[in-house]
Image: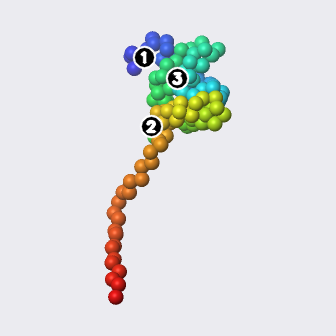
Amino acid sequence: MSKMQGNKNAEKWSKDVTSEFWELSLATAETKTIYTWIALQDKINESEWHIKVNHGTWSYLLDKFKDDEGKSVFEGIKKAIHKRIEHNITMAALEGKIHATVAIALLNNHHDWSQKHDNRQTGEINIKITKKVKK
């Protein structure tokens, strides 16, 4: 903790300020032109908040505030932002604002989408083969 003392950047992230930041992030993601976390980062850096964030800011803030069970108190809003960005990509592709190939690449690389379905069976399978004999 001694390294945090005197660190003006670390000290500004109170729970209230962090909550406002997550709300700003969600509101910004709700604009239909945000397709990646990097675009969200750039938009926030240009905002009236006069702060500079980078790709690690959200992870840092997720880890900083945990509940009694050790889960981040802001995990729900992070998921909402992630889903909103996914929605923005999908709608932009359907409306022809971005090429479908770009949308597929973004969804595959950042939203756990896949064009290949995994149909592996786990567990035990019993197969009984019977042969019918003609008389």
Position of residue 84 relative to residue 38, above or below, is below
Extreme bottom residue here?
135
Q: Earlier in the sequence, mark 3 or mark 2?
A: 3
At mark 2, the secondary structure is loop
Q: Is residue 63 above or below residue 51?
A: below
- Name the mark nearer the viewer: 1 or 3: 3
Separation (CA) of disc 1 from disc 3: 27 Å
Q: Position of residue 71 (x, y in %)?
A: 47, 37
Q: Do the residues bearing badges 2 and 1 touch, measured as CB atoms within 8 Å?
A: no
Task: Between residue 49 and residue 91, name the one nearer to us.
Answer: 91
Q: Quadrant of residue 95?
A: top right
Q: Identify the element where label 1 is drawn.
A: loop
Q: Residue furthest front?
A: 135
Color style of the picture: rainbow
Q: Position of residue 43 (x, y in %)?
A: 60, 19
Q: Which residue is mark 2?
A: 70
Of badges 3 and 2, the one in the foreground is: 3
The three-letter amino acid code for the residue at tag 2 is Gly
Task: Identify the residue at horizontal 46%, vertical 33% (top origin).
Answer: 109
Q: Quadrant of the N terminus?
A: top left
Q: Which residue is mark 3?
A: 38
Q: Quadrant of the C terminus?
A: bottom left
Instruction: Identify the residue at image location x=54%, y=14%.
Output: 52
Q: Which residue is mark 1?
A: 4
Q: Residues within 10 Å of mark 1 (few under 14, many from 20)?
A: few
